[in-house]
Amino acid sequence: QEIPTIQIIDAKKYVGQTVKIGAWLRQKRGSGKIAFLQLRDGTAFFQGVVAKADVPESVFDVVKSLKQETSLYVVGEIHEDERSSFGYEIAISDVEIIGESHDYPITPKEHGTEFLFDERHLYLRHLKPFATLKIRNTLIAATYEFFNERGFTKLDSPLLTGSAPEGTTELFETDYFGEPAFLSQTGQLYAEAGAMAFGKVFTFGPTFRAEKSKTRRHLTEFWMVEPEMAFMHQEESLEIQEAYIAFLIAKVLERNEQELDILERDKDLLRSYTELPYPRVSYDDAIKLLQDNGFDVAWGVDFGSPEETFLANHFAKPVFIVNFPKAIKAFYMKRHATRDDVVISADLLAPEGYGEIIGGSERDTDYDYLKERIAAEGLNQDEYEWYLDLRKYGSVPHSGFGLGLERMVTFVTGEEHIREAIPFPRMTNRLRP
Ligand code: 4AD
Ligand code: MG
């Protein structure tokens, strides 16, 4: 009978059977009589046990020679292992080295973060990055599920653009056959064009901001999900936003138990964030609340991270801060019906210090007003002619928002720093690997 080749994650289906697994050696310990091999194969992590008495001497010699990150095939019988959180192990009877490994730089001792990110191409193999990026993968898959189930069309927006809708200070400029072009800060304007063609769309792709501030929440290249809905006002958009966040968290709880355990993320706390609705607090009230709690903030300022953290922790849930001052928001946001100083916008702030995970608004629909705002912001008017066309030919109320994927990853995984949330982070001080 042929020995089945399996993945570690499926070990529970093969208890008592002899199987073959392609894996890498994470760590090895043991004595002259027994060796414990910590194995990983990209699906899970478990232990292989090799007893000298049970295998030919040649096999035990190979095992003794194995180095960290050697790739190998192991053959053995799957057993239950109540001592490990995974629950199974393999009693190895044979080993075949596939790829040697020497002087692997990330040893079991503690390393500094900068070093680990210099070695990110290897660090990806380790427990924490593995778990974090598996959860990122679930968030991506669940995003497509959520929007597909609701009749949205995925619309791909360009990454090379002539426009700077989120302001001109954070642009990466590049040469486009002799004319200046910018790496996209947002897909929104294109999503708005898409909404007028397909009704409900979402973009999802990398966006770029030359953020000079070094914080644990900012990348220069990050991925954004940007839904845009025609014939929709802001309140309905907020309902979609909270349903989307709760859906994402529920899917991670359902599919990533192993990864949440590796990261020691509190699952009950996460589950509490799936209870809707999330509170809606006006910017005015948020300022008052902050002032009442000793923050030195005046109406009109943008929130910094201590303010964001306080607000979301105060409600013990993600919280929408609605209707920000016009002066600190983008040109396209819809005017308030009765006030000239605020716009119909909402930021969704995550609890526990993970900051703003969504920014969104209803969009103004008036041609003349937007033309004025574009000029007032000092934006290049020629670049927005096509955008203004959307207000000339059947303009309708529409709303949309942008979720920062890596912010969401840090929130769900409990990671302290956003660099953990993307395979190869780009920050002011990091372009490699
Ligand atoms: O609030 P922002 O700037 O909104 C927009 O770009 C709109 N065009 C979205 C829309 O309405 N379609 O960015 C949206 C989200 C933020 O809430 C945050 O989660 C994330 O993108 N974000 C960043 N994430 C990582 N690094 C950065 N430098 C980020 N800047 C924004
Ligand atoms: Mg924002």
Image (cartoon, rainbow, N blue to C red):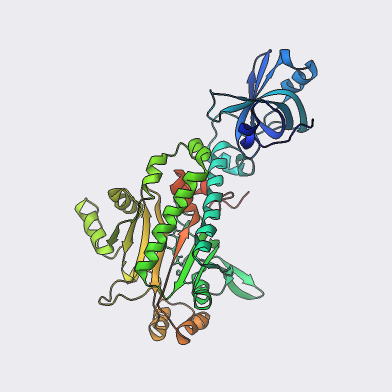
- Left or right: 148 as drawn, with respect to 36: left
Which residue corresponds to the image point at 74% horizontal and 32% vertical from the top-left?
Answer: 73
Question: Hey, which residue is sitting farthest left in the picture?
Answer: 292
Say above or below: 170 vs 128: below
Tally the marks: 0
Say above or below: 229 vs 78: below
Q: Is residue 343 visible?
A: yes
Which residue corresponds to the image point at 39% horizontal and 69% vertical from the top-left?
Answer: 361
Q: Nearer the viewer, residue 260 or 79?
A: 79
Q: Which quadrant of the figure has residue 70? A: top right
The quarter in which the N terminus is drawn is: top right
Q: Is residue 428 visible?
A: no
Horizontal and vertical percent for residue 14? 66, 31
Horizontal and vertical percent for residue 411? 43, 48
Horizontal and vertical percent for residue 297? 25, 58
Which residue corresponds to the image point at 23% horizontal and 61% vertical from the top-left?
Answer: 285
Q: Nearer the viewer, residue 197 or 302?
A: 197
- Left or right: 170 as drawn, with respect to 432: left
- Left or right: 258 as drawn, with respect to 360: right
Horizontal and vertical percent for residue 123? 60, 40
Q: Nearer the viewer, residue 248 or 35?
A: 248
